[in-house]
């Protein structure tokens, strides 16, 4: 709202209540949506790392114009139509390692809360009925436009827009309730209300559901920058007019993801990429995760490309390889003062970056510098137990945000050790063909062997690209 960074102070000390606009489940989420969802996840993780308990609420919009259209074409009800997309949303979140929110309220399950808020707005003169619809009267709310710094001169009193989504140009009274159309009943998309049979507009759900789960004033509200106007502006107007209290203490918005041509990715515009598309093209969901949260600050635009995803995959591989190497380390008896001082310095810089408006890219840059230095120390074989512990602690702290270095695949180390032993046995028996086959088999799994004075070491390497 102020447009500047501020120190976060919640209403209740030690607790952060956070409402984040979730998916409209009319289709699969595209990567631009996923960027916003992973930004919510990063914020949630940082709040927890800073010692807050978090109540995170993320709505599922399971009724809007597009869902009605699609359900009608599919000859089903809206409830049936959205089911596979709800399942897909949770699958995507899990594949991308987003921590689950505490509550995922659905619009269609909170109609009574919406009816109550609309009734209050009518009572207080902030809303009016017209031809079976109910509209919010924006000229009754002088703060309208404060979040998006809208020029109120362009505001047309009394002009009405019933569509769930509309352009920046049309600053107009917006629908709180929409009169049932013929066919809505069969779609399961019409409810009884004192102001007529119909269904809620898109914006009222977030005001009603955030109040239900987080109260009248929220600590934090997030969304993609495309929701700033009109959606969040409308949420503020509805909530503050109905409750007579400030709605949100801190707003955060994540920037667009553009496709390879530089256009904003949007489902409505047709050309969009889903996580499924990327996985089918051979990309690892963890590389997608890293690309979306660690490649650029959340307030910078980023462009999706195969090159950028390959670069992220390589960064994830280097981090995982390093973490595995430290975990497996057989410590030397050396002095670790220099290494430990560097780890402390990087940890301090990393924390400072994350505490400064979630600057994960800067924090990760520091970590990569340390990875280079520590790998060199590991190559020299002079990292002791104290150094190993310090590195493991830092890995854990960084992975609380990134979540890409977590343990190896179960059983991998045992499997690799077994194959290394078999290869050694084959070499002793001078069966070099067999030894080479085992080495090639490991290479296909992304494991490279290095013969050293102290025996055979292994590390993770990039697998061959298949596309
Ligand atoms: Zn919302």
Image: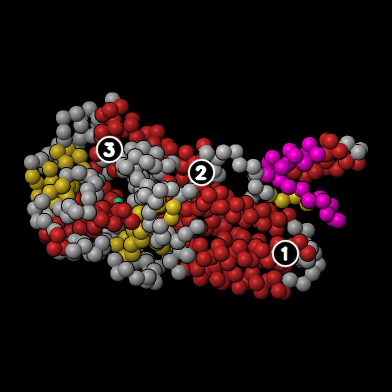
Q: Where is mark 1, residue-wise?
A: 376
Is residue 25 or residue 199 the one in the foreground?
25
Give coordinates of residue 31: x percent, y percent: 43, 46
| Residue 308 horizontal side relative to residue 149, left or right | right
Residue at 56% across / 52% down in the picture?
A: 311
Q: Residue at x 33, y 31 (%)?
A: 81
**For the residue carrying disc 1, how many other residues have a C-alpha within 10 Å: few (<14), some (14-19), or many (20+)?**
few
Whether label 3 touches label 2, CB < 8 Å: no
Residue projecting furthest to the right: 429
Residue 431, located in which quarter of the rendered image?
top right
- Quadrant location of residue 439? top right
Q: Would residue 31 appear left or right of 416 to someone viewing this image?
A: left
* Magenta range: 436-456
Residue 39 vs residue 442, the one in the foreground: 442
Measuring from the top left, give residue 314's x and y in whole percent: 60, 52
Give me the residue at 36% from left, 50% from top.
264
Question: CB atoms at circles 2 and 1 under 8 Å apart?
Answer: no
Q: CA distance from mark 3 to mark 2?
A: 26 Å
Q: Is residue 115 left or right of residue 257?
A: left
**Mark 2 lies on residue:** 95
> Which residue lies under the disc numbered 3?
66
Residue 446 inside the magenta-drawn segment: yes
User: Vertically, is 89 above or below 12?
Assistant: above
Front of the two marks 3 and 2: 3
Question: Residue 294's spot in the image, x, y percent?
Answer: 50, 58
């Amino acid at each position: 709202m102020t447009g500047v960074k501020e120190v976060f102070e919640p209403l209740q000390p030690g607790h952060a209540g956070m409402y984040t606009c979730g998916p409209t489940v009319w289709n699969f989420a595209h990567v631009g949506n996923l960027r916003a969802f992973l930004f919510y996840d990063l914020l949630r993780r940082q709040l927890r790392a800073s010692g807050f308990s978090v109540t995170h609420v993320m709505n599922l919009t399971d009724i809007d114009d597009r869902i009605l259209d699609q359900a009608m074409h599919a000859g089903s009800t809206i409830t049936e139509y959205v089911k596979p997309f709800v399942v897909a949303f949770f699958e995507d979140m899990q594949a991308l390692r987003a921590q689950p929110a505490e509550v995922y309220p659905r619009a269609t399950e909170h109609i009574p809360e919406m009816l109550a808020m609309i009734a209050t707005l009518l009572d207080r003169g902030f809303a009016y009925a017209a031809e079976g619809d109910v509209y919010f009267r924006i000229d009754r709310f002088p703060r309208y436009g404060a979040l998006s710094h809208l020029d109120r001169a362009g505001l047309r009193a009394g002009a009405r827009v019933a569509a769930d989504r509309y352009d920046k140009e049309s600053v107009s009274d917006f629908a709180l309730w929409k009169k049932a159309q013929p066919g809505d009943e069969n779609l399961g998309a019409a409810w009884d209300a004192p102001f007529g049979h119909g269904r809620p507009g898109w914006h009222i759900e977030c005001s009603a559901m955030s109040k239900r789960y987080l109260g009248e004033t929220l600590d934090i509200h997030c969304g993609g920058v495309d929701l700033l106007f009109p959606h969040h502006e409308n949420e503020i107007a509805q909530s503050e007019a109905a409750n007579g209290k400030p709605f949100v203490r801190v707003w955060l918005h994540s920037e667009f993801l553009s496709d390879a041509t530089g256009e904003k990715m949007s489902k409505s515009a047709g050309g969009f990429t889903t996580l499924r598309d990327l996985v089918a093209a051979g990309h690892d969901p963890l590389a997608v995760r890293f690309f979306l949260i660690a490649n650029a600050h959340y307030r910078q635009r980023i462009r999706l490309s195969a090159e950028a995803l390959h670069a992220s995959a390589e960064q994830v591989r280097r981090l995982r390889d390093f973490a595995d190497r430290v975990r497996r380390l057989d410590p030397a008896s050396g002095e670790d003062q220099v290494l430990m001082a560097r780890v402390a310095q990087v940890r301090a810089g990393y924390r400072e970056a994350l505490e400064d408006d979630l600057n994960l890219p800067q924090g990760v840059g520091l970590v990569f510098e340390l990875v280079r230095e520590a790998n060199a120390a590991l190559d020299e074989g002079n990292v002791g137990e104290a150094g190993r512990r310090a590195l493991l602690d830092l890995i854990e702290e960084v992975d609380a945000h990134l979540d890409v270095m977590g343990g190896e695949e179960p059983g991998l180390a045992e499997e690799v050790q077994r194959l290394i032993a078999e290869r050694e046995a084959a070499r002793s028996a001078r069966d070099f063909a067999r030894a080479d086959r085992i080495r090639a088999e490991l290479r296909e799994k992304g494991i490279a062997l290095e013969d050293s004075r102290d025996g055979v070491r292994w590390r993770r390497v990039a697998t061959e690209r298949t596309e």
